[in-house]
Image (spheres, rainbow, N blue to C red):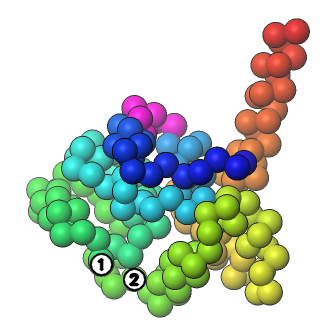
Amino acid sequence: KGYTLPSGCHLADIAKYGLLAEHQYKQWLPHLLLAGFNPVDLLCETWLNTASDNMLNFTLEFTNWKRLPSFVGQILFCHRANSTRTREKYFDDIPSLAHLSRLKIRSTLKSEYLRFDKFIRQLPLPACLHDFLLYKEVLKLYDIPEISEIREEMQTENDYIEYSED
């Protein structure tokens, strides 16, 4: 709450530490991406060559995968040609208009509005579009608990730590 998203010289550190915490990506990466962090900033050569298939595919869900920087496309193409990566088949297709619309809507919102579901839920849209803007189907596809559940879990852990220190 109130923190700014990493940028500039911190981007390389985020990618580096992200790979170190790769086995826990479901706990931190959704927060970062749903808060408006540009996923292309993670897609450096090291990330592309080292990240697990699931973590990389999850990250690609937050992009227009047909308009990635050319070096990213080349690395992904080489991996696919060598069959060293498992990518979702739909990444070979042009993104749907719905997906592109979601990216555009989210890109027009400031990151401080994207950090909390509450702002999206207050938009004058049907609940199904709120869920779509919050990537609920993507979180479910990758078996990632809803962000609200993760926050409750983290709060419970913090309460336990504070209680056990007393």
Instruction: Tell me: 46 left or right of 146.
Output: left
Q: Which stretch did the figure color magenta?
A: 17-24
Say which quarter of the image contains residue 153.
Answer: top right
Residue at image point 36% right, 61% down: 40
Q: Which residue is mark 2?
A: 95
Proximity of marks 1 and 2: CB atoms separated by less than 8 Å: yes
In the image, taking residue 132 as reference, residue 81 lies left or right, namely left
Q: Is residue 126 visible?
A: no
Tag 1: amino acid:
Lys
For the stretch drawn in magenta, the main secondary structure is helix
Sequence-wise first label, 1 or 2? 1
Element at label 1: loop
Is residue 159 or residue 23 the one in the foreground? 159
**Residue where numbered disc 1 is placed:** 66
Real-space Cα separation, disc 1 to disc 2, in angstroms: 7 Å
Task: Point out residue 85 in the picture as x, y percentages from the top left corner.
Answer: 25, 54
Foreground of the two, 6 or 46: 6
The structure residue drawn at horizontal position 59% and vertical position 42%, both measured from the top left corner, is 27
